Image (cartoon, grey):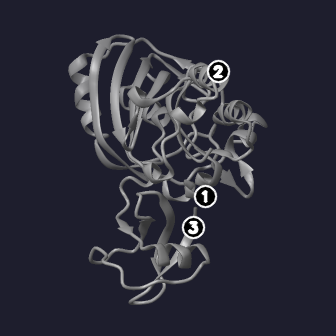
Amino acid sequence: MHGLLVINKPAGMTSHDVVNAVRHIAQTRRVGHTGTLDPMATGVLLLLVGSATRLAQFMADHTKVYRAVVRLGAVTTTYDREGDVLEQHPVQVTRAACEETLAHFRGTIQQIPPMYSAIKVAGKKLYELARQGKMLDRAPRTVTLYRLDLVDWNPPDLILEVVCSAGTYVRSLAHDLGQVLGCGAYLHALTRVAVGDFNLEMSRTLEALRDLASKNALSAALLPPAAALVAMPEVRLTAHQVQAVRYGQSIGDLSTPPECIILKALDQDGHLVAVLIPADSERWRPKVVI
């Protein structure tokens, strides 16, 4: 059991809850996620199984696609529906005003993460401090919203489609939108539609995984480890090179793209052997061996 699982996370579970569920289903401890979803959120959660867990470090920068329901008229402590309401305001916003405001959030922006987040400050997660009643200044982060479209307008709710860089908080986007509109807003529902090239259409529910496991067919849900590195340049190794890499040795004589700084190395059958990085100007060494 080695590879990538595309999970459709249900609402009410943390990402770690899903990892534990898959560990039980697959009967292995070697399961890890590549980026969390809030308990309230549903949708695509990528899990790595077996030796593929070593690839998590290369999957952090995937573009994300979300469908978000933003509710106007209130501000909450967590910037979503699970927080306590701090303020309530009448909603007297037009669709045109909302569209105009959304335009200011498109592109590369500075975003302040919510206090209720897993970001660590001095070894403590922000949400742990928030639960103790402590509020800290948070440094803004640079994020990019490649697309931000209003797909449905039904005040006080509006539905947004968000295509964004890794590290973007849709909760913060909802909160900031409400601040600019002057009526407050919070995230009422969130579905992650895609992570990189992996989308809901190719995802599996936990129930579906349990059904496959009961038929000893769980491997049918696993994508090969190489799928986790779909955007990474690749090189095919000879049998001799495969053996050398598996012993941790550097290899040369590779035909590589110009200015390439990382490669996925496949054997002649297309199976992932390793991730390679430059050892010097002519040779490559394994960073991770599968």
Earlier along the polypeptide chain: callout 3 or callout 2? Answer: 2
Say if residue 88 shows up in the picture.
yes
Q: Kindly identify which residue carries mark 3.
A: 288
Element marked by disc 3: strand
Q: CA distance from mark 3 to mark 1?
A: 7 Å
Of residues 213 and 202, the one drawn nearer to the viewer in this rendering: 213
Q: CA distance from mark 1 to mark 2?
A: 39 Å
| Number of the front mark, 1 or 2 | 1
Amino acid on which the number 1 mark rests in the picture = Arg
Q: Residue at x 36, y 68 (%)?
A: 235
Q: Kindly identify which residue carries mark 2.
A: 84
Earlier along the polypeptide chain: callout 3 or callout 1? Answer: 1
Element marked by disc 2: loop
Residue 252, percent from left and from top: 41, 85
Residue 195, percent from left and from top: 42, 40
Q: Residue at x 61, y 52 (%)?
A: 53
Q: Which mark is residue 115?
A: none
Q: Would residue 2 appear left or right of 135 to someone viewing this image?
A: left
Mark 3: give few (<14), some (14-19) or many (20+) Cα within 10 Å. some
Amino acid on which the number 3 mark rests in the picture = Val
Mark 1: give few (<14), some (14-19) or many (20+) Cα within 10 Å. some
Q: Residue at x 35, y 20 (%)?
A: 159
Q: CA distance from mark 3 to mark 2?
A: 45 Å
Of residues 99 and 168, the one drawn nearer to the viewer in this rendering: 168
Work out which quarter of the rendered image holds the C terminus and state it. bottom right
Residue 56, percent from left and from top: 56, 54
Q: Are marks 3 and 2 in contact (CB under 8 Å)?
A: no
Mark 2: give few (<14), some (14-19) or many (20+) Cα within 10 Å. few
Q: Kindly identify which residue carries mark 1.
A: 54
Amino acid on which the number 2 mark rests in the picture = Asp
Q: Quadrant of residue 133?
A: top right
- Relative height, residue 75 to residue 27 (above, below): above
